[in-house]
Amino acid sequence: MGAGAGRPQLDIPLRLTAGSVVAGRYRVGERVGAGAASEVFAAVDQTAERQVAVKVLREGIGEVLRQRFLEETRILSGLEHPHLLPLLDAGVDGGLPFLVMPLVEGTSLEQVAGPKPPDWVRRVGAAVADALAYIHARGIVHRDITPGNVLLDRDEHVFLTDFGIAKAWDGPALTAENFVAGTAGYLAPEQAEGRGASSASDVYALGLVLLETLTGVREYSGTPFERAVAAATRSPRVPPALGAPWCTVLRRMTARDRRRRPTVDEVRALLHGRTPPAVPVAEARRTVAVAVPLAEHLGLAG
C-alpha cells in the first residue's frame, strides 16, 4: 500500500495551479517540468515545512503510462545513493498517483552553457557513473541519460534524475508495441533499432552527454526524427581537439557495437582516477589490453 493511503481523496485537475494542495499536505507552487504523461511542481510540504517537488500523473492517461508511473515509484522506493534523489512520499490522490522528492534548487546540464573545462566534466561524469553503477548492480537500466536529467544544485552536487522509463529486471514489460523508450539523439544504436537497452546503452548515452558538455554542441540536433535518423546512420564526431585521452574514452563509450564499450565500472574508475577494475580471466585477453592503456592515456592509472 502506498504512503498516501488513508489520506483524504482530493480531486487533482489536469494541470494543478498555484495554491492547490495534494494529499492535504503539499501546497503547489510553480510548474517546473512537464512531459506527455506527468507534470512536476515546486511545492511546500506543510507538515515538514520544506520545499519539495511533486510529480503528478496527468488525468486521462492510458493504462500503460499509468503503470509506468507506478513502476517508477516502485524503483525509486528501493534506491538510496548520494547522486540519486530520494523518494520522500508517494500515494494516490483523487485517483491519480503522485510522488514527492526533494526540490533541487540549481540547474541541469542542459541549461549549463558549454563548453565546460575537462576537469569539471570529469567530476560530473564520475558522479553520474557512480549512480549508474549503483542502479546497474540492482538490475536497473535508466534508458534516458540526457543533459536534462543530470541536475546540479547550488553547490554543484550532481543528481541523476527521471526514472520514468527505467527498466528493472524484476519489473513488468511496459513498453508499448512499436515504441522506443528513450530520448531521440541520446539513444544507443541497439535502442534505436528496437533491440532493447542494457547497461551498455546507458554507457553510450553518458558518452554523448560528456561529449556535449565538453564541446558545448549537441551531437545530434534537429527534430526528434532528424536526430534519430542521424544517430542511426553515423557515429558521433569526437573532435581531435579534445585530445587523445578524451577521444579514446568517448569513442569507446559510443562504439556502435555494445560489446566494444567499457563497463560502467571501468568508466567510473577512469573518471575517478583509479585503475579500472579487474576482469574475469576469460575476458582478460580482450579487455585488459584496452583498459589499462585508457587509464594511462588519461593520466589516471595507478
Image (cartoon, helix red, strand yellow):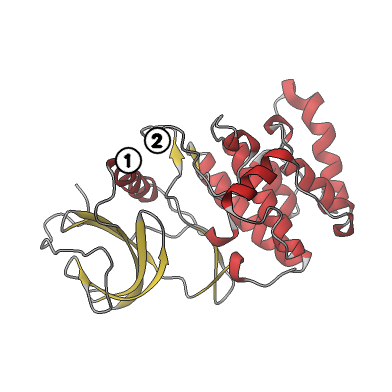
- Note whether 261 is above or below 218 in the view shown: above
Mark 1, other Cα within 10 Å: few <14 / some 14–19 / many ≥20 = few
For residue 95, side relative to residue 40 (left or right): left
> What count of labels does the image hold?
2
Label 1: element kind: helix
Q: Which mark is residue 135?
A: none
- Note whether 285 is above or below 49 in the view shown: above
Instruction: Say which residue label 1 marks.
Output: 64
Residue 269 percent location from the top left of the image: 71, 48
Q: Nearer the viewer, residue 294 or 165?
A: 165
- Kindly identify the residue that appears in the image at 54 percent across and 49 percent down: 183
Q: Nearer the viewer, residue 255 or 294?
A: 255
Residue 260 percent location from the top left of the image: 74, 33
- Kindly identify the residue that appears in the image at 53 percent across and 44 percent down: 143
- Kindly identify the residue that appears in the image at 70 percent across and 62 percent down: 213
Label 2: element kind: loop
**Residue found at the far top of this picture:** 282
Q: Is residue 265 visible?
A: no
Hey, what amino acid is under mark 1? Val
Residue 157 percent location from the top left of the image: 57, 68
Task: Determine which quarter of the picture holds residue 75.
Answer: top left
Residue 169 percent location from the top left of the image: 44, 32
Mark 2, other Cα within 10 Å: few <14 / some 14–19 / many ≥20 = few
Q: Are marks 2 and 1 in contact (CB under 8 Å)?
A: yes
Instruction: Say which residue label 2 marks.
Output: 176
For residue 87, side relative to residue 165 (left or right): left
Hey, what amino acid is under mark 2? Ala
Tell me how far mark 2 sits from mark 1, CA to CA. Answer: 7 Å
For residue 19, side relative to residue 103 (left or right): left
- Note whether 286 is above or below 8 in the view shown: above
Q: Nearer the viewer, residue 19 or 8?
A: 19
